[in-house]
Amino acid sequence: MKVMRNGDYLFCEYCSSFHFPEESDDGVRVLGEPTALTCPICRAPLVSASLEEQPALHCDKCRGVLMNQWAFAKAVEQLRARASGPPNPPRPLNREACQRRTLCPMCNQSMDTHPYAGPGNVVIDVCVDCAVIWLDYGEFRAVIDAPGRDRGTQQARGKQP
């Protein structure tokens, strides 16, 4: 099967069928096309995925996600704008997670580990040289479901006359 242009579904050239993978709890659509890169946490192979139609790589073992920083920002903006329902209460930041050292799957250099400057109180790993961000399972959902004025703005605009 071949990943289609927008990166959210697959097409089989043999039987001309389409496959639309379901989203995980974290909003990731795993496309399953293997890559040569390995997970910075558990060293399992990363597979192609998408998050809000943005390309990503996914670890099937620990369910972490690697994506371009700009694609991450766009996905966060879109999903927070469409968010409905009450936000999750703020959670405390896990300061111990800031001590972790991970290597970038792309360049094998040490990633910067620090609190995410946006909502959600999560610790992220960033490779400035490769412009990629690593999110452990649950961190993306914590960002989307965190309180903030940008959350649900698309619904609010739709309700105005």
Image (cartoon, grey):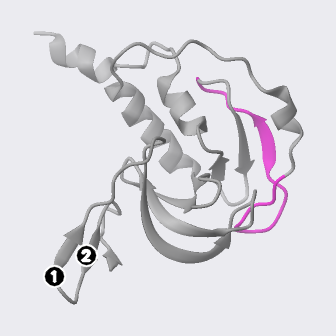
Question: Which residue is found at the position 64% from the left and 54% from the top?
Answer: 132
Question: Which residues, given as a range, are shown in magenta?
Answer: 102-119
15 left or right, relative to 57: left
- Residue 124: x %, y % from top left: 70, 40
Residue 140 higher or lower than 57, as above or below: above
Mark 2 and mark 1 lie on one chain; the one further toward the N terminus is 2
The quadrant holding residue 45 is bottom right
Q: Amino acid at mark 1?
A: Ser
Q: Closer to the camera, 13 or 55?
A: 13
How many residues crowd mark 2 within 10 Å: few (<14), some (14–19), many (20+)?
some
126 left or right, relative to 2: right
Q: What is the secondary structure assignment of the residue under circle 2?
A: strand
Question: The C terminus is located in which quarter?
Answer: top left
Q: Amino acid at mark 2?
A: Phe
Question: Which residue is found at the position 33% from the left and 78% from the top?
Answer: 2
- Residue 97: x %, y % from top left: 82, 36
Residue where numbered disc 1 is placed: 16
Q: Which mark is residue 75?
A: none
Question: Which residue is found at the position 75% from the left and 22% from the top?
Answer: 93
Q: Closer to the camera, 80 or 129?
A: 80
Residue where numbered disc 2 is placed: 11
Mark 2 → mark 1, Cα distance in angstroms: 7 Å
